[in-house]
Every structure is written in structure tokens, then in C-alpha cells.
Amino acid sequence: MRILGLDIGDRTIGIAVCDPLGLTAQGITTIKRKSIVIDIEEIDKICKKYNVESFVSGLPKNMNGTIGPQGEKVQRFCEKLRETLNLEVKMWDERLTTVAANRVMLEGDLSRSKRKKIVDKIAATFILQGYLDSLGTRL
């Protein structure tokens, strides 16, 4: 069971994948957004490389739990992804994942320029790991 985790933003998409047992998430790359067609083609290549069976996308919500304009953009992208690749896409509340990713990188003493390059990949890892943990597959 390979699941791809996505942190979808306006400029980039952070990508993480779980191990074959579905226990741990690892960040693998960040895609620079070009167009919805090209973005989905890039994701499809990654899906084929890792034999992905489904997706978990972070859903940006407001702190009060409502879905704003950014969340609606992500939902539209995920619907197109589901239609194009014919794979299940689950939405996962991503509130504070970018904050957590930045905190971890600060604790690791990464420079600002290094943090900027990998924050979306780390956020995708947090999204996917949160989802995996919710499944109760931990030993």
C-alpha cells in the first residue's frame, strides 16, 4: 500500500510517499507549479515510479475549521487529479503543518534558504504521517 502525500500550494507542490507497509512517510520532492496539466503529469510520473495506490492531500482550513479560497483551490485540483489518474484522493486537515515543518527545520539549524527549498516537502511528510498514524497501523 503506497500512498502519496501532497502539500498543494500556488507555486509548489510538496510530495511525500509512505513505505510499502504504510508505516512511515518520507519527503521525496517539490514540484514547481506550471499548469494543472503539467503538474498532474509530474505527479503521475511519481505515482508510477513508486506504485502509488492513493493520495492524501493537505486541506488548508481556517483556524475556525471553515474552508476558505485556498482550500477550495486545493479541492478543485484534487478533483482533477482524481478524474485524471483514477486514484482515490483523501483530504487531511493541514492546519499548522507548515508551522511544524518550519519548527523542525529551525531546530535542525537549517538556513533560511535551505528551509525555503524544502518546507513544502516536509509539510507533505507531516500531512502523510498524520494520516498514516490515524489509520492505527503502528505496531
Image (cartoon, rainbow, N blue to C red):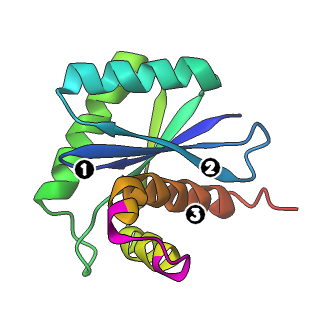
State the residue position of label 3. Answer: 130
- What's the magenta region? 106-113
Q: In which quarter of the image is the C terminus?
A: bottom right
Disc marking residue 26: 2
Residue 3 horizontal/vertical position (percent) = 60, 38
Residue 33 horizontal/vertical position (percent) = 22, 35
How many residues crowd mark 1 within 10 Å: few (<14), some (14–19), many (20+)?
Answer: some
State the residue position of label 1. Answer: 9
Q: Is mark 3 on a helix, strand or loop?
A: helix
Q: Residue at x 49, y 38 (%)?
A: 55
Q: Earlier in the sequence, mark 1 or mark 3?
A: 1
Q: Is mark 2 on a helix, strand or loop?
A: strand
How many residues crowd mark 3 within 10 Å: few (<14), some (14–19), many (20+)?
Answer: some
Q: Nearer the viewer, mark 1 or mark 3?
A: 1
Closer to the camera in the image, 47 or 101: 101
User: Is residue 30 placed above or below 62 in the rendered structure?
Assistant: above
Q: Is mark 1 on a helix, strand or loop?
A: loop
As measured in the structure, the alpha-carbon distance from the residue carrying label 1 to the one carrying label 2 is: 19 Å
Q: Residue at x 14, y 63 (%)?
A: 68
Say if mark 1 contacts mark 2, CB within 8 Å: no
Q: Earlier in the sequence, mark 1 or mark 2?
A: 1
Q: What residue type is labelled 3?
A: Gly
Residue 58 visible in the picture? yes
User: Is residue 121 placed above or below 109 in the rendered structure?
Assistant: above
Q: What residue type is labelled 2?
A: Gln
As measured in the structure, the alpha-carbon distance from the residue carrying label 1 to the one carrying label 3 is: 19 Å
Left or right: 66, with 129 as reference point:
left
